[in-house]
Image: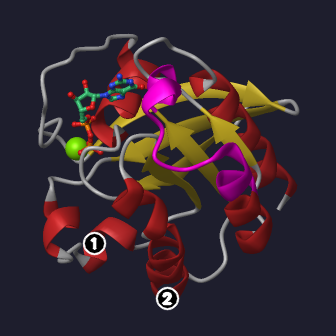
Amino acid sequence: DIEHPVKVLIVGNGAVGKSSMIQRYCKGVFTQEYKKTIGVDFLEKKLQVSGEDLRLMIWDTAGQEEFDSMTKAYYRDAEACVVAFSTIDRASFEAVKSWIGKVEAEVGSIPMVLIQNKIDLVDDAVMTKEEAEELAKEVKLKFYRTSVQENYNIDEVFKYLSELFVQR
Ligand code: GDP
Ligand code: MG
């Protein structure tokens, strides 16, 4: 079969768990150590959805998200996107619409999914369940609660995004 390469972005404020999520999904590892970057442009993961072989190339940021200086090269030719915020970071929640806007300004409308990461810390949540669901409704994206630490819903997010991509 032909294998389709797909450039996937993960956007969101610093420290929401983007690098951790890429490492977890592509390499199956998790560490508490805060890492600004995974040191490479992207990691790959192969999967099959709806009978199609995909090779996801999941791009990480090198921490530039904190300086609002994401390069054009990061966005260029992106075909799908995970938009992430953190359960324990209100600013990351409030930045979601701005991240979606940036992606759409650079590459137009592409398959996207919204995630609330660090759901293992839900007892310390700084937004209500209703607020998060309201935001998802407003931006019209499917919404997943995830924990990279507990490996909860990570595979599901990328499977859903891949299905959207195949059906586009
Ligand atoms: P990035 O800046 O968005 O790439 O975030 P990182 O992947 O560097 O993660 C920031 C910190 O959050 C690190 O210490 C991670 O170990 C931690 N982290 C990531 N995902 C989770 C999670 O689901 N639960 C918890 N409790 N910590 C997480
Ligand atoms: Mg990072």
Q: Is residue 17 left or right of residue 110?
A: left
The three-letter amino acid code for the residue at tag 1 is Ala
Report the residue marked by disc 2. 105
Secondary element at image label 2 = helix
Q: Is residue 98 left or right of residue 47?
A: left
Q: Quadrant of residue 3?
A: top right
Q: Report x, y in % for residue 89.
A: 36, 49
* Residue 144 image label: none
Residue 12 is at least partly visible in this image: no
Q: Report x, y in % for residue 149.
A: 40, 16
**Quarter containing ligand 2?**
top left
The three-letter amino acid code for the residue at tag 2 is Ala
Q: Quadrant of residue 12?
A: bottom left
Magenta stretch? 118-133
Q: Residue at x 62, y 52 (%)?
A: 114
Q: Report x, y in % for residue 119.
A: 52, 28
Cα separation, mark 2 vs mark 1, equals 14 Å
